[in-house]
Image (spheres, helix red, strand yellow):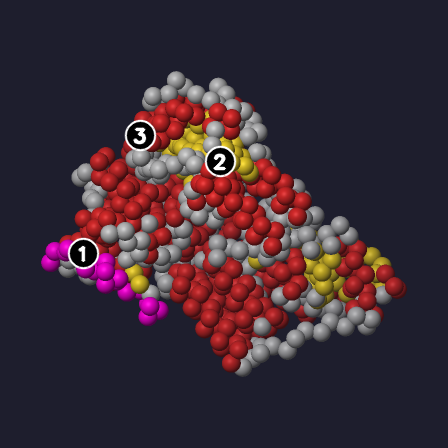
Amino acid sequence: MSKTAELLEGAAELFPDEVVTQAHVRHLDLPYGAGRFALVTLDNGLDHTKPTTFGPQSLANLDAALDQVEAEAAAGDVVGVGLTGKPFIFAVGADLKGVELLKRHEDALAIGQGGHAVFARLSALAVPTFAYYNGAAMGGGVEAGLHCAYRTVSAAIPAFSLPEVFLGLVPGWGGCALLPNLIGADRAVDVIIENSLNQNKQLKGRQVYELGIADAIFEGADFLEESLKWTAQVLKGDVEVVRPEIDRAEGWDAAVERGRGIADGKVHGAAPAAYRALDIIAAAKNGDLRAGFDAEDHALADLIMGGELRSGIYAFNLVQKRAKRPAGAPDKKLARPVTKVGVVGAGLMASQLALLFARRLEVPVVLTDIDRERVDKGVGYVHEEIDKLLLKGRVGQDKANRLKALVTGSLDKAEAFSDADFVIEAVFEEMGVKQQVFAEVEAVVPEHAVLATNTSSLSVSEMASKLRHPERVVGFHFFNPVAVLPLLEIVRGERTDDATLATAFTVAKSLKKTAVLVKDAPAFVVNRVLTRFLGEVLGSIDEGTPVDVADRALAPLGLPMSPIVLLELVGPAVAHHVAGTLNAAFPDRFGVSENLGRVVEAGKRNLYVYDSGKPELDPEVAALFRTGDTVLTEEQVRDRALNAIAEELRIMLDEGVVAEAQDIDLCLITGAGWPFHLGGVTPYLDREGVSERVSGKRFLEPGVASVPA
């Protein structure tokens, strides 16, 4: 038994539930008389919704297949070896379910070394090797192909990425060393760092080719057939693959520095994975792949044994699994069909909603407002956004025309909504206004129609209390910008029935939103947590802590933006309004900043000015502030904010605002951009000991999203 086989056999014992990938070898005669060829197909035997992964036994199977083709190549029985996947899937990398079970550094190191040992054999064969990216390829799947001499890609591929940094790892089976040496450091930084930290952005097949990762691109329908023809031409010398020369001078160094700037902007030094990946890319400048692979092994092992990976996997499982099975959602069979949507209001939020409903549901959408100017402006916004999609190639001309025709405006609610199945209001955040709107809508819609409110903080039950049919009112709280943030808080009022709720969840799924069921409690989940958090930061400023000190206090968490920048994004007026709502409900925990009130009264939309390139407190805002003389340090502000969050989360769970702590984490990850590397708010509070300090117990079971014992 080879050393690699022994290594993988030992590792396989640690992965008892591995979904094993087979590596099937078949032989064929290439076109144009190019010779006999060995094609290795990766296949886990499951349907295309169950992606192929690499655990230890899967790597061992590929290793055994390479034993066979290595012997055939040495004997002159084959002229080349190809690697491809089952229909729609090439391979999506390491089996993360097993990786998170590892407890010892040496076991984690063995996983990296085992993958490298197997994949390196692809580049060491006596004949040329070819990777045919026929379907989704991520992580280790991409890296297996990078070890081959040549690569083709299907134009139909929907997802291609190296997502490891997003999860708290590095591309550890050759990605960090091989990719910059193939396409240059600058493009490699785009794929490994920027795309990964940009919510795991995926590449399409055409982009893979244009980046130079693949040497040829073919349409999906006859991809393998065309790839084999191209392979034959390469082997016969009829096609020469020419790759651009790599800049190994200042351009390489500049790319690495650009990557560090991206990492600083996203995680602020609080998560190590991106920086470890950049260190390896920097060292790969000299082309020493063996040293690069060794550095990948050790970085991978270190990160596997750290808390970031487990946090990343926890967060990944939330958005990939829990989000697809919302806790508390009623039977989807109860949902009613939605063939027309009404939107009350034609402002920016309402217009964004109209665009989303039209694009995803492809049903008529009609906006109403108090005058023709507002209605025309709202419909015009939607049409302009559709034109932008057309210019970007996101939709064709026919599709753009159809979408525009679906979105209309009216001043007559009776005419507009008489046949609507789903009507959502997005008007001024004031209870009396919303109650009046719903009374007007209820009088003209069919009895089966769902009435949804996009309120961010008001009581859905109170909003429905004066209606004849309060059971069909549901909260449908989107987050701005609507097209970007996935979260949709679905709020069940005291009398909301199952059919209404089921319809809401079915619509949310059609909108491709992450729906979380929440109780009708003040500000629901995200706004309640953020308001408590911002309240403590603003409270420390009101008491005398300098704005810049308070604003830096949370930097060690690596949040996507500082508290004051978040406040500016939300809008001082909105934040002040929500704070007032929560203060009325919970005056002992939620304060209302008098300084923020003065900012709102003065009509200021921002607290900072950026004339010098760095944020500085606007002198006009500074002149409005009245502060005390209690000055806290950054650490004291941070402790104050985290203690408050931990207290509020425990109260929310005790109140049953959501089913479990995982739902709070899912909300903050998808609705507030809480970083994946923290795994959500509750794992972070558990790891830092804040949970037990505040309430005497953890939010999650020991070991969940934590460093292994």
Is residue 622 visible in the rendered image? The answer is yes
Is residue 122 visible in the rendered image? The answer is no
Under mark 1, the amino acid is: Phe
Q: Residue under circle 3?
A: 432
Q: Residue under circle 2?
A: 367
Marks 2 and 1, how far apart at CA: 41 Å
Q: Quadrant of residue 34?
A: bottom right
- The answer to which of marks 3 and 1 sits earlier in the sequence is 3
Instruction: Check contact, mark 2 vs mark 1: CB within 8 A.
Output: no
Highlighted range, magenta: 611-629
- Residue 582 is situated, as x and y percent measured from the top left of the image, at 25, 38
- Residue 656 is situated, as x and y percent measured from the top left of the image, at 33, 32
Above or below residue 121? Residue 15 is above
**Relative to 265, 603 lies left or right:** left
Mark 2 burial class by Cα count in 10 Å: few <14, some 14-19, many 20+: many
Mark 3 burial class by Cα count in 10 Å: few <14, some 14-19, many 20+: few
| Along the line of sight, the residue nearer the viewer: 598 or 188 | 598
